[in-house]
């Protein structure tokens, strides 16, 4: 069968689902007459009617049902194969929140050595557009904070853990402390994350209450790591962060004090479930779980 005839098969499968020419045409992005032409052409190749058509309804004929049972699995497999090949030919694009690049750097290097013919790129993402790049298919995978509780996303193993620290201004009395307990956060104003940040991150990484349930006052919204450091340095606000940030970001007037009472920040790699492909699976399977 010539490649151009795939359009006939696709039209047949969509019409078999919709049993309505107008709806099938809308799904295919074609005119209704063009859908009719494709079906008629396929019927000529088959040598029999595939649909019974009346002014009120469209139904599959026995021949149409016979063809549907045999063609649909093969056509679905062909589409998956084409998508897999497209993903194979394209580079694997990994997004990361700034502080968490280190969680995946060595894994990316190992992956490149294991697959020298596969291109891998890394792109920094923003707190204010947390899963936006992933959902817009601008990246294939994204290093994020565990847990990920998004119904359209799949997560790999926990690949890094970072102790918690509190960012405070160097002239803040807390700066001289050897540690700060999470319960003390109720006595200080915490910077706020953007609204786009998932609720599981708000609750786990920058909680609104202490472990014992005391409310933690909120201050200004900060959209980037540099914005957070500047805010902390020039106000009385603090930020519960992790040592992931201290490896890459510094400010001369900000001190990081060990913060006890909160679980460590954990990093995972996530991807869109409906976008999974051979490169994503291979990279995810190469990661070592810490828990």
Image (tube, grey):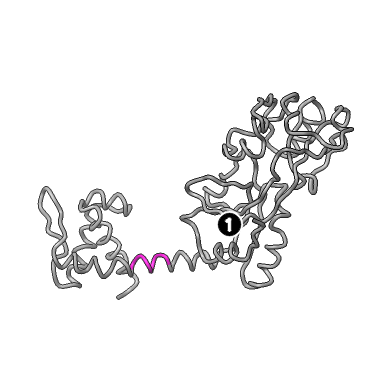
Q: Is residue 79 magenta?
A: yes
Residue at left offset 48%, top offset 48%: 152
Q: Secondary structure at mark 1?
A: strand
Residue at label 1?
A: 156
Residue at the outermost left position: 54
Packing grade of label 1 (10 A; few <14, some 14-19, many >=20) is: many
Residue at left offset 58%, top offset 40%: 200
Image quarter where the N terminus lies is bottom left
Location of residue 77 by image quarter: bottom left
Q: Position of residue 74 (x, y in %)?
A: 33, 70
Q: Position of residue 116 (x, y in %)?
A: 66, 72
Residue at left offset 30%, top offset 49%: 26
Tell me the magenta residue range: 75-80
Residue at the outermost bottom position: 1
Q: Position of residue 139 (x, y in %)?
A: 58, 53
In the depicted view, which residue is nearer to us: 242 or 264? 264
Q: Image height check: is 13 above or below 124? A: below
In the depicted view, which residue is nearer to us: 123 or 180? 180
Q: Does residue 236 appear to the left or right of 217 in the view shown?
A: right
């Amino acid at each position: 069968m010539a490649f151009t005839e795939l359009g006939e098969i696709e039209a047949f499968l969509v019409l078999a689902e919709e049993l309505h020419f107008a709806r099938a045409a809308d799904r295919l992005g074609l005119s209704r007459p063009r859908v009719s032409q494709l079906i008629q052409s396929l019927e000529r190749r088959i040598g029999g009617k595939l649909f019974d058509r009346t002014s009120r309804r469209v139904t599959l004929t026995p021949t149409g049902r016979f063809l549907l049972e045999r063609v649909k699995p093969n056509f679905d497999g062909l589409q998956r194969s084409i998508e897999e090949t497209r993903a194979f030919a394209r580079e694997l694009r990994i997004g990361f929140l700034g502080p968490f690049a280190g969680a995946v750097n060595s894994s990316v290097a190992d992956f490149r050595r294991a697959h020298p013919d596969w291109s891998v790129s890394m792109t920094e993402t923003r707190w204010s557009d947390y899963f936006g790049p992933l959902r817009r298919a601008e990246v294939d995978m994204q290093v994020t904070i565990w847990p990920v509780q998004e119904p359209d996303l799949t997560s790999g193993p926990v690949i890094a853990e970072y102790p918690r620290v509190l960012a405070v201004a160097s002239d803040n009395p807390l700066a001289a402390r050897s540690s700060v307990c999470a319960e003390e956060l109720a006595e200080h104003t915490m910077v706020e994350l953007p609204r786009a940040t998932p609720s599981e991150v708000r609750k786990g990484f920058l909680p609104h209450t202490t472990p014992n349930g005391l409310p933690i006052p909120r201050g200004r919204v900060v959209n980037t790591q540099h914005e957070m450091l500047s805010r902390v340095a020039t106000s009385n606000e603090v930020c519960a962060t992790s040592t992931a940030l201290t490896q890459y970001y510094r400010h001369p007037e900000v001190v990081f004090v060990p913060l006890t009472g909160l679980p460590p920040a954990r990093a995972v790699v996530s991807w869109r479930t409906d976008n999974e492909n051979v490169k994503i699976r291979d990279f995810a399977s190469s990661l070592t779980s810490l828990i």
